[in-house]
Image (cartoon, rainbow, N blue to C red):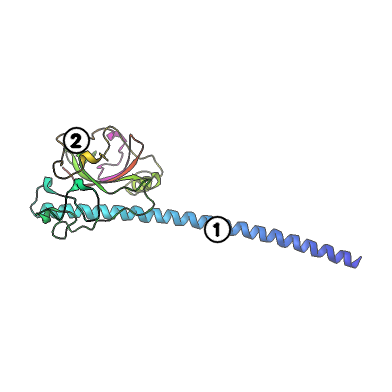
Amino acid sequence: MKRRDEDGNVLIIILVAIMLIGLLTAVIQGSSNNDNANIDKEQLLLNASRVRQYAMELENAVSIIVRNGHSEVDIRFANPDSTIADYGDMSADTEKTRQVFHADGGAAEYRSAPVGIQTSASSWEFYGGTSLPGVGTSAPDLIAVLPNVTLAFCQKVNEMNGYAKGTSPPTDTGSCLNAGAAERFGTGVTFDGTANDATGEATFTVLPAMQGCARCDDATYNFFHVLLKR
């Protein structure tokens, strides 16, 4: 009888130990999931801050070129890292002082987007066919666009620019602010006489819309920053 009682006690101790191990494992996994979620949020915030800061660096570079006496239509965005020929050839340009990414011009560093914020890898684009709501006159502004960003990134950027947390990005209907290859700002194509994009302004609740993220009709999300208001 004594041995049977001892065996029963040992079995109970083993079962209790298994239960405690299970509870401990669940707690550790829950803590790990929370840590990963916090890391993801922190990384998203960091990436949004990086993109916003870089856009302001580009704006400053454009300002330097204009202050140095160049016309707004002479600004160029050729760079040594991009394969996009529409922005020109920096090495062949005799007027390096008008180049945003040249040391003698705007002296901006060309950088790609942070990893993980785009649904498909896309280079920075530069256009002169969008009149942003509340910015300057009705003339099209010079803007930088980072195409194909994720919805989470889009919402975070807009939150940082004054939109309510988690709200849908403003809808940019009609010709998208990410206007495509034919509208890239460079030789032969600068500012449109009439802005391509002058619709969907009612959804831009934060004005002036100097920076933010919008959803285009093709369901893509695109970060934008005004480099030169007109």
Q: Amino acid at mark 1?
A: Ser
Res 23 quadrant in image: bottom right
Disc 1 is placed on an element classified as helix
Nearer the observer: mark 2 or 1; the answer is: 2
Label 1 Cα crowd, 10 Å radius (few <14 / some 14-19 / many 20+): few
Relative to 116, residue 2 above or below: below
Which residue is at 71% across, 60% downward? Answer: 18
Res 182 quadrant in image: top left
**Numbered circle sitting on residue 173:** none
**Number of numbered discs overlaid on the protein picture:** 2
Relative to 168, residue 10 above or below: below
Residue position for label 1: 31
Query: From mark 2 to mark 1, how far is it between C-alphas?
Result: 51 Å
Which residue is at 37% across, 50% downward? Answer: 117
> Could you tell me residue 215's position as x and y percent?
34, 38
Task: Specify which label sits upstream in the sequence, 2 or 1.
Answer: 1
> Could you tell me residue 223's position as x and y percent?
30, 45
Disc 2 is placed on an element classified as loop
Q: Nearer the viewer, residue 7 or 155?
A: 7
Q: Is residue 174 left or right of residue 33?
A: left
Q: Is residue 165 left or right of residue 59?
A: right
Which quadrant is the N terminus positioned in?
A: bottom right
Q: In the image, is residue 210 part of the stretch drawn in magenta? A: yes
Q: In the image, is residue 78 part of the stretch drawn in magenta? A: no
> Could you tell me residue 86's position as x and y percent?
20, 45
Q: Amino acid at mark 2?
A: Ala
Residue position for label 2: 195
Q: Is residue 11 left or right of residue 162?
A: right
Which region of the structure is painted magenta? 200-214
